[in-house]
Image: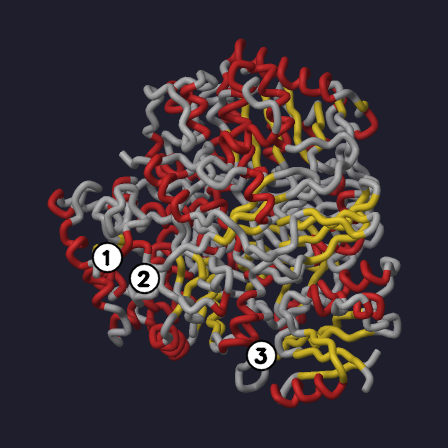
Amino acid sequence: MANGLYIDFEFCSGCHSCEIACRNELELGITDFGMKVLEDKPRQNPDGSWHWDYIAYPTELCNLCEDRVAAGGIPACVQHCQAKVLYYGTIEELTAQMLEKGSKGAIFIP
Amino acid sequence: MIDMNKVASDVLAATPKTGPTNATAWKTQDGDETIFRTCAWSPPGCHPVGCGLRVHVKDGVVTKIEGDPEHPITRGSLCPRCLALKEYIYHPDRIIHPMKRAKEFRGQADKWEECSWDEATTLVANAAIEIREKFGPETIIVFGGTGREANNWYPQWANLVFGTPNSVYAQPGWSCYGPRMTNTAFMMGGGYPEIDYASKFPLRYDDPRFTPPELILLWGKEPLRSNPDGLYGHAIIEMMRRFGTKIICVDPRVTWIGTRAEEVLQLRPGTDTALAMAFIYVLAHDDLVDHEFIDAWTYGYDALVQRVSEMPPSRAAEICGLDEEQIWRAARLFGNAKPSSVAWGLATDESTNGAQLGMCLVALMSITGFLDAPGGTTLGMGDDQGNVVRDGGSISADEKVDDATDSTLELALKHGMMSEDTWFNKRIGVDKYPCVGSVMWTCQPDEMLKALETGKPFKLHMAQFVSSNPISCIGGEPQRWWNALRELDFNFACDLFMNPVIQACCDVFLPVSSTIEHDGQVVTHYGLNSSFYGAENKCVQVGDCKSDIEIMRMVGKKIFPEFWNRFDTDEDYNNFHVFRSWLPWDTLRDNVVTMSDEEYFKYKTGRLRPDGNPGFPTMTGRLELYSYAYANFQEDALPYFEDPAYGPVSMPKMMESEYPFVLTTGARRQEFFHSEHKQVPSLRQISPYPEVDINPADATRLGIEEGDWVEIWSPYGKCRQKAKVTPTIKEGVVHAVHAFWFPEQEASEPNLFGAFKSNINNLMPTSVNAKSGFGNTFKSMICNIKKVYDNDDVNFPTDTGIMLEASRQCEFTYQETWRPTDAPVVDPIPQDQILSFEKTPEIDNIVK
């Protein structure tokens, strides 16, 4: 079973920690991103409630931190995420986790 | 008189002596790499959150910086600023050798020369000795910034190295943390109140003593971005996800966490006190209060209820521009939550009505019964690292024997660096504003600016900048500070990077070590509400940089050798004065993190009062909802609403004509700590330009589109930022980022790294203070905004040209006259209501 990343993007605060942690880990250049934070900008719904989402996704440069994982660790983005909304595991495990929450989740295979 | 020895020994007794037994050692070896576990403070600037780092070092050079998974609060996470720490400490622009420059070349970037530490510190010491002798020690002033580790050092530089009482926190109205500290000290003592996130327990949320908050009221605060004063902001997200903790936000901006809140009360800036009074009105109206707590532990509840009866939600709705129904709904949600917790933000400090807001928020924390209760708002033990003026400043120098609990001030008086006359009579502005002087250890900043300009009550001669950049950041009307400071006889700075104030005004630059280049200690809330004691462990040496303490020791030995010669190492000084009654340094270091493990309900167990009796360390022994301390400083003993000095009610004509917008500023961003970090590539990439938030309706009307350069101006001055068009800002209000300068631009005067191009404080007056001397207009100013078209105009912040047009600062003198000098009506203190520290009979009986 392939491994991937699950993000509970209801609670991604858009802090950019994953981007820099990834760049440090993969020793990427300043313009390169292995994780990238995207924003769906704020808007107010007709009922007065607010919508404003961030979501971090792994780019083609992501290798799911194979060296860290081989050494018994977890991917750098997952470890450093301040909101603790990123998870690493098999797609099966992550799917179960996402379904249990039931909303605003995404699983990525880079 | 408070017996601080007793307080200190209580703190010592409450401090666990060991850390987790199975944790990784602070220093381990992995092949050719050494891995250090350490807790971060500053530099670079940050609050004392003490996030856990693992620093990998090979051949004396940092190879990698990661979060420490064993840190009980951050558990492996880090924010972008520590993740980019390697870029910061090895930045090519960092200054790593001492430098000097002849006074006539101030403002010229190419005139600095490298010099030895001995030469640089001798220049400083000789200047100070000469100025002390010729003009008096009080003519030396020492600037410090906000929140940083250097907050420990700048009063110590002032009192112990130079013997001057005039340390300066330059923000108008001391508008950061000080007012909240004062509110806390006056109303209840006990350090500083903070939301409960199980931050004191080794087991955190799993500790059986802990109950999660059902609801957190975030008032004028965005902790995810600011991690204020030691609160690890993202813990709120953990509690929302794990326990379903609900949020109410009070903010003119809808923040990201606001979009996840049950209610966002988007009020008109500066009207918070009206809303907070209406919250209390609703709690009293619906009887959603804890009468047992109120009867046993508080003073003046009935008077408070009578006062807020003037502010029903209908009236508050009108003042604040809110829907009355929403106020009832939100206040009831808060009142019915068990437990509820209150996080009071910077908005409390940055307003002239802020003390009254603070009074209301302390009431909201407490009358619900959840003060220092599980899941409520915790109180600290209130040890203060020695720098807070205690007991109204009535320190006696009679006792000449050193004591482990001596404050900085006591040491300075005992060892003759400063005379009592100097302390009591030469601290600028505290005669006019004794309320500020009673708790804060500095001068009153607005009065200091006037003294610099007028030479009254005496002429100032020398300034030091300890990690502070008042003309790019905290100073209001920054060009006034610039003009005044460049005229002084001698100026020097302790910092890591060149910045506008050093380039413009200084003669000597002393390079400081970063948080991973020196040994030290970080305690959340500066010790006023300690989650844990963290060790800052030295991992590497960069250039010739030295710790603030070592620099202080070097200069101190040349001015007061008798005192300073006793310290051969930083550890000697730390153990003598900084760590004092806490753990010895080697134990702190070995533990890396030592949880405070403080218990709840300290007012019941006698841990708040120096005499060990239950109750609060106030005049009545109770939490004073009716504040005698404020009354003693000629303020109303109860909260009241006063419209901001600048706004649609105070200045309707000006707002109808030239200044139709209300301006707020000061909201933090994750990637910068105030004026710092602008030169760090990974961080600047996130926010390359200063941005002003404007509502889409306003933007459309003015023809402003996202990304346009706009000019923002007030009666005091102007600046340029980029428009960010967003519905999250209330219509008719703009929010502009603060402290933006351009380290990549021409350093020399007049450009000074573009210091005045985008500085929103160009628009902010000084001296618009509350009666107490606290507070200012940062959260409610008036302004106008327009698109600027000319891309060749050198006034553009992206251009390396200069701001040609003179500022209108100083021409507008409304601040001198805005407040009528009416004497407030203050009820005399009924003597029979005052419980002395020796006897608290009623309360004794109440304690179970």
Which comes before the other along the chain, label 2 or label 1? 1
Pointer 2 chain: B
Q: Quadrant of residue B378?
A: bottom left
Q: Position of residue A6 (x, y in %)?
A: 72, 80
The chain that hosts pointer 1 is B
Left or right: B624 as drawn, with respect to B225: left
Quadrant assignment, res B3: top left
Contact, mark 2 vs mark 1 (Cβ under 8 Å)? yes
Q: Tell me the quarter of the image containing the N terminus of chain B.
A: top left
Q: Residue at x 53, y 37 (%)?
A: B152
- Name the residue at 74% across, 42% down: B754
The residue that mark 3 highlights is A50
| Residue B595 percent across, percent down from the top left | 50, 53
Mark 3 lies on a secondary structure that is strand
B329 left or right, relative to A72: left
The residue identified by callout 2 is B366
Q: Nearer the viewer, mark 3 or mark 2?
A: 2
Instruction: Tell me which residue sits at (47%, 65%) in the image.
Output: B218
Give the Cα distance between marks 3 and 2. Answer: 31 Å
Find disc 1 in the rendering and name its residue.
B298
